[in-house]
């Protein structure tokens, strides 16, 4: 079975690429209008964003294991992964190429640093990215399942406690009413006269005081 999603990839890619270029030109047009320099600036920002995402994922699982932080990292990584999967390209790469008219500076910097081939980099990065998205998704599903389980257990415990409380309350109320009816209304023969004497003495002392 093959699932196909019909949308205009070229139009979406061109729109994203154009917006990225406009954003870079807006922030750095005061510095230079040279396309190659702007392309290298975009490539540096590309690397900084990648490193920042990686650091945030590490921090969200070590020093700041907050759920909202982990969800934020997952959402950002998911958006990037969907772009790579659905558009079959990195729009930042295209913007860099459009600026420099040659290889993207992001890849050039990586090649000069670690000497990796472009095709090998794309395949390896996509595999690592897909694995990271899957692991983070399973982690969030596990946390959500644990939260639901704890809520169910706590609610079940609270429901049981309140049920036992009301049952005990109504039981002792019934016992008290039953004893009161038998002792005061029906005047059990064995204790009726004793209770009458005790109550008459109690009320006499009460009203005298």
Image (cartoon, rainbow, N blue to C red):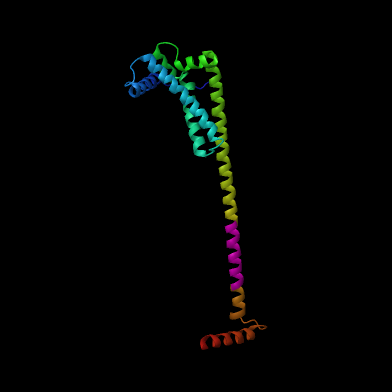
The residue lying toward the viewer, choosing from 143 and 45, is: 45
The residue lying toward the viewer, choosing from 161 and 101, is: 101
Q: The N terminus lies in which quarter of the figure?
A: top right
Kindly give the residue lying farthest to the front in the view shown. Answer: 31
**Residue, x 40% and y 17% (percent of image)?**
39
**Residue, x 57% and y 47% (percent of image)?**
152
The residue lying toward the viewer, choosing from 78 and 193, is: 78
Kindly give the residue lying farthest to the left in the view shown. Answer: 30
Q: Which residues are magenta?
A: 161-176
Establish if 148 lies above or below 195.
Answer: above
Q: Position of residue 188 (x, y in %)?
A: 64, 81
Q: In which image quadrant can residue 130 be found? A: top right
**Residue, x 50% and y 35% (percent of image)?**
71
Q: Position of residue 194 (x, y in %)?
A: 64, 85
Q: Position of residue 38 (x, y in %)?
A: 38, 18
Can I make out residue 27 in this image? yes
Give the side of residue 42 with respect to residue 55, left or right. left
Q: In which image quadrant can residue 159 be found? A: bottom right
Kindly give the residue lying farthest to the top in the view shown. Answer: 102
**Residue, x 52% and y 39% (percent of image)?**
67
Establish if 62 lies above or below 130.
Answer: below
């Amino acid at each position: 079975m093959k699932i196909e999603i019909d949308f205009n990839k070229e139009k979406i890619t061109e729109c994203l690429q154009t917006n990225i270029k406009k954003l870079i030109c807006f922030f750095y047009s005061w510095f230079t209008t040279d396309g190659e320099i702007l392309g290298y600036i975009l490539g540096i920002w590309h690397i900084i964003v990648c490193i920042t995402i990686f650091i945030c994922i590490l921090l969200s699982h070590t020093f700041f294991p907050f759920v909202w932080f982990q969800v934020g990292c997952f959402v950002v990584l998911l958006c990037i992964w969907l772009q790579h999967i659905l558009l079959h390209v990195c729009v930042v790469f295209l913007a860099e190429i459009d600026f420099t008219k040659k290889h993207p500076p992001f890849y050039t910097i990586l090649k000069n640093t670690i000497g990796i081939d472009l095709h090998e980099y794309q395949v390896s990065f996509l595999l690592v990215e897909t694995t990271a998205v899957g692991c983070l998704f399973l982690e969030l599903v596990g946390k959500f399942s644990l939260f639901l389980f704890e809520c169910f257990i706590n609610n079940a415990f609270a429901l049981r406690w309140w049920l036992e409380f009301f049952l005990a309350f109504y039981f002792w109320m019934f016992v008290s009413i039953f004893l009161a009816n038998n002792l005061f209304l029906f005047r059990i023969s064995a204790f009726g006269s004793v209770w009458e004497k005790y109550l008459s003495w109690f009320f006499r002392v009460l009203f005298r005081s």
